[in-house]
Image: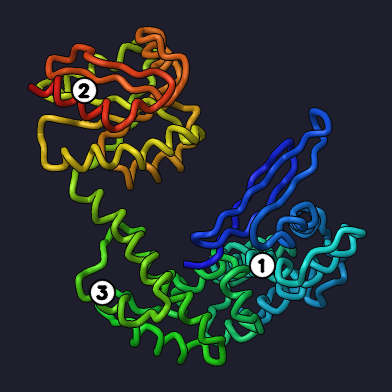
Amino acid sequence: MGQSFFYFFYKEKYNLILLSPNKTTTLNFAHIDCNNYNVKFEGEFEQVFRQSEAYAELIKNALFGYKSPKDRNPLSKKSRFQSANDFRDSKLREFDDRIAFAVEKMKPLTVSRSLQNKLSMFMKADLINKYDSLVVRYNREIVVDSLLDSPVSPERDISYYQNLLKLNNSEDDILMFFDPTFLQAIRKDSVLDLPNLINNPADSFISRLRKLLPGQNDLFYEVILIGAYVDQINQKIPLSENQKTIVNSYFKNAQISNYIHYRNALVSDFSKKSFGRYYLPYDTAKNDVLNDLLLKYKGKVVIADFWATWCGPCIDAFNKIKEVKAQYTSSDDVVFVYLTDQSSDRSRWEGYADIIAGEHYYLSKTQMNAIYTEYNIESIPSYLLFDKNGSLAHKNIGGYMGNEKLIKWIGSTIK
């Protein structure tokens, strides 16, 4: 659809890359010794990558190193704010101060105004998402809570956005540097009460958005609309046929409509087959859980995929195996079972389990180690194929065996 940021740590150093669709970016690390290296950058947006260290320092100093002077806010230590807009303006001044403090603190490193704005928007998202809790925290700090007749925060209205959206961003900045947290906060804000796209066409959505938040760049409104379609898809509500037609006709940029259709296809394709997501009880007295699982699927050929959220080859294999799974979508004789353990990040596991068709299990490390020991599994991804009686028929340890071999295995076992 557009550029996306990718963040990673290497040798305890923060790296920031801006990626474009259908474009290749390559980093070549040439080590001087174990901890020191040079990086050759090949691709677009090298200037962004070269600001990785500076942006990390900006974040660290602005979010964690800043301390507000006692006299920064004239209302501080005196009384609560009388309006939501007063509170907003106070926090916006604080955010500006945080950025200015961080920029000064990090010298001689420098960071672009666009990346400074990106961090500012990240902080602004809290003024929407966490408004009530921020006001409560402020009141507690000035020991007002116990004195107030009403602990209710001053109510926000549409005027709250007047200073929040003083952005003046170029189209490039909107596509590349707008913070997604801030955009999502806008889309889901009850003050705006934006219409859902299930019952409202794109034109109506944009019309209301323009009325509520006038004077913005046209691309700003379009990016909010794209996010609203993706929000619907993320809720596992596929686009209707009418919505697909609207997406094709409304967006003139084919990359945008293709991206929305791609995200929709993930939900639509996987929703054709039932999903299962199970947390096994961590009963240390019973670690032989695989045999119990196989009993559940007696009469079916079981392909057991051992993986983890941190395992790149495991995740890469998900795309490769889709072709095989598609052949058995309507079959009741074959089931794909995915097993991981507590080494996997729970929230990321849930995300994968929501979009990958099959039965998903989250085991304890002890339970998984018992399986690894029984079947001599020393690395992942690994695959075990069991026949309809629950007996092991084939296995491949430490890598995906390939679609051709898996199809052959299933064909020979399903008879």
> Looking at the picture, how far across and down is residue 291, in whole percent?
24, 14
Q: Which residue is mark 3?
A: 243
- Amino acid on which disc 2 is placed: Trp
- Amino acid on which disc 3 is placed: Gln
Relative vertical location of residue 300 with respect to residue 284 in this rendering, above or below: below
Relative vertical location of residue 36 with respect to residue 51 in this rendering, above or below: above
Location of residue 337 (image quadrant): top left
Q: Nearer the viewer, mark 2 or mark 1?
A: 2
Local crowd size for mark 1, using a 10 Å CA cut-off: few (<14), some (14–19), many (≥20): many
Question: Which residue lies at the image location 78% right of the left edge and 52% below the top edge?
Answer: 53
User: Circle 3 sits in a helix, a strand or a loop, which is it?
Assistant: helix
Q: Which residue is mark 2?
A: 409
> Looking at the picture, how far across and down is residue 151, in whole percent?
57, 68
Q: Estimate the spatial distance between the alpha carbons at disc 3 and disc 1, rounded to whole Å.
A: 31 Å
**Mark closer to the chain start, 2 or 1:** 1
Q: Is residue 330 left or right of residue 245?
A: left
Q: Which residue is mark 1?
A: 118
User: Circle 1 sits in a helix, a strand or a loop, which is it?
Assistant: helix
